Image (spheres, rainbow, N blue to C red):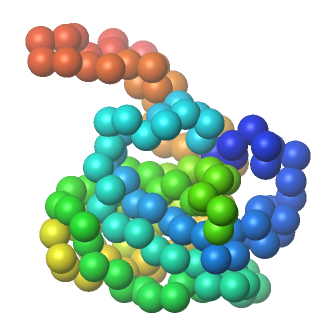
């Protein structure tokens, strides 16, 4: 979980309470380095709306999000890379890693297709340092012909 600055001192339970009535927007791959930054290079794949309360009690280390609908129809095609959680008033609360592999949010399918159902199947919160992305990718804005970051 990558928290927006105003929420950085809150506990997980306080953050979950703030998400009541908010949204979880699933984006394609390009995650901003911080939840405080705008999403500028990533399409919206799907939007889930949290119920009130937003979460039931965790079970075996997995959070139990409560949505008004799950599945929801995909708004575009692509592979999920992260999900941005917003409070009911639209304020950004946190970013969560999403998609296949070692991620916080898992879906029934690896990719989304426009109009097809997107079903969230697992949700676990990981500390920010546990995200699988490499730090040297955070500020990279590769363009055609740009070299990729060098491996370790």
Q: Is residue 108 visible?
A: no
Where does residue 143 sit, x and y in percent of width and height? Answer: 20, 18
Q: Is residue 108 above or below residue 43?
A: below
Q: Is residue 7 above or below residue 101?
A: above
Side of 142 where 25 appears, left or right: right
Q: Quadrant of residue 74?
A: bottom left
The front one of 14 and 152 is 14
In percent of the image, x 76 and y 67: which residue is there?
18
In percent of the image, x 37 and y 53: which residue is there?
27
Side of 22 where 53 appears, left or right: right
The front one of 150 and 74 is 74
Q: Is residue 77 visible?
A: yes
The front one of 84 and 128 is 84
In percent of the image, x 86 and y 58: which residue is there?
11
Identify the residue at the far front of this view: 89
In percent of the image, x 83 and y 69: which residue is there?
13
Where does residue 115 sit, x and y in percent of width and height? Answer: 18, 76
Q: Is residue 137 above or below residue 9?
A: above
Where does residue 53 sit, x and y in percent of width and height? Answer: 72, 84
Q: Is residue 112 above or below residue 29?
A: below
């Amino acid at each position: 979980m990558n928290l927006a600055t105003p929420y950085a001192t809150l506990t997980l339970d306080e953050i979950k309470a703030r998400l009541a009535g908010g949204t979880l927007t699933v984006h394609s791959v390009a995650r901003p380095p911080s939840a405080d930054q705008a999403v500028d290079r990533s399409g919206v794949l799907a939007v889930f709306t949290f119920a009130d309360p937003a979460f039931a009690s965790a079970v075996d280390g997995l959070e139990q999000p409560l949505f008004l609908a799950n599945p929801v129809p995909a708004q575009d095609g692509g592979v999920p890379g992260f999900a941005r959680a917003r409070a009911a008033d639209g304020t950004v609360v946190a970013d969560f890693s999403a998609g296949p592999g070692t991620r916080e949010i898992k879906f029934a399918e690896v990719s989304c297709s426009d109009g097809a159902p997107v079903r969230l199947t697992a949700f676990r919160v990981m500390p920010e340092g546990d995200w699988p992305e490499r730090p040297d990718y955070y500020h990279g804005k590769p363009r055609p012909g740009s070299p990729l970051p060098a491996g370790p």
